[in-house]
Amino acid sequence: MRQPLMLHGFPSSSRMWEPLLSLLADKYHLIAPDYPGFGNSRAPSPSNFEYTFDNLAKVTNELATKLGITNYVLFMQDYGGPVGFRMALSYPTRVRAIIVQNAVSHEQGLSPLWEARKKYWADPVHELENLKANFTSLEATRQRHIGSTPNPERYDPDTWNDEYAFLSRPGQADIQATLFLDYRTNVASDPRWQKWLREVQPKMLVVWGNTILPSASPGRQPMPTMCREQKSTSWMRDISHSTKRLTRSRCSSATSLNV
């Protein structure tokens, strides 16, 4: 049976995949893990767990190995991109195809919004509070969901209120700030991921929303360094960065795992 491995983004969890779990579980064996520190997985403090993308990929690889999943389609959203690319380079023969939703493998895919966030990379001690305001505030959380839509009233406010409640849990701000500091390593890894894509040319579908990673816009090809030399399908739509707008039902016939 075909097995998509569904890797969520910031600050989501396997819950974001619920609409797809319920729609596709009769045809696919869907695996949707929560990373450590996300969703209902354990959230040790940064002093007791290494919150890096290398480590998230390592834990997810170990989970796949433990479950005996050696052949899968990687569905990578946001943070799922750097986690998934690391997994693909570690075990390339496991990957049958990739689906990319709002994740980049080139620095030009980061919007001007990231300039403020890059200041944190350069001076994390003095920029920490600015990062939290820019990254974990209620307004920033809401904006991730409504994006640039002209009809914000059509969005369920429970989605960003639930997400903000998650971000407000004790210790979450430190966890997310620590992991975001490590996002610098993703930018540095872009050339390796681009090289892998050019050489392997996996089957790939790109789904894009014009929000905080707006490298897809009218007249501009999403993820250009990924798509330029390979056969891929791109779908652009003005959607929110997070798919949790759609997560209103529970699914019992697919696999959603906390690690």
Image (tube, rainbow, N blue to C red):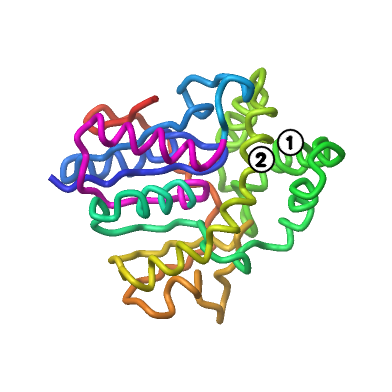
Q: Which residues are magenta?
A: 52-81
Amino acid on which disc 2 is placed = Thr
What's the distance in space between the residues labelled 1 and 2, CA to CA? Answer: 6 Å
* 96 with respect to 103 (left or right): left
Identify the residue shown where x is 49% and y is 62%.
Answer: 208
- Please name whichever residue, 162 or 59, is drawn nearer the observer in this view of the structure: 59
Looking at the rendered image, the quarter that the N terminus falls into is: top left
Amino acid on which disc 1 is placed = Ser
Q: Which residue is mark 2?
A: 141
Is the residue 82 above or below the residue 248 in the image?
below
Q: Quadrant of residue 258?
A: top left
Is the residue 73 above or below the residue 126 in the image?
below
Mark 1 and mark 2 residues within 8 Å of each other at the beta carbon: yes
* 16 with respect to 136 (left or right): left
User: Callout 2: helix, strand or loop?
Assistant: helix
- Please name whichever residue, 250 or 81, is drawn nearer the observer in this view of the structure: 81
Q: Quadrant of residue 67?
A: top left
Q: Position of residue 221 (x, y in %)?
A: 51, 76
Q: Position of residue 157 (x, y in %)?
A: 60, 37
Q: Quadrant of residue 52?
A: top right
User: Callout 1: helix, strand or loop?
Assistant: loop
Identify the residue shown where x is 51% and y is 43%.
Answer: 9
Q: Position of residue 41 (x, y in %)?
A: 46, 23
- Number of the label disc, if any, that sits on residue 137: 1
* 239 with respect to 141 (left or right): left
Q: Residues within 10 Å of mark 2 (few under 14, many from 20)?
A: many
Identify the residue shown where x is 55% and y is 52%.
Answer: 241
Is the residue 162 above or below the residue 79 in the image?
above
Tell me, yes or no, whether the highlighted magenta stretch contains residue 76: yes
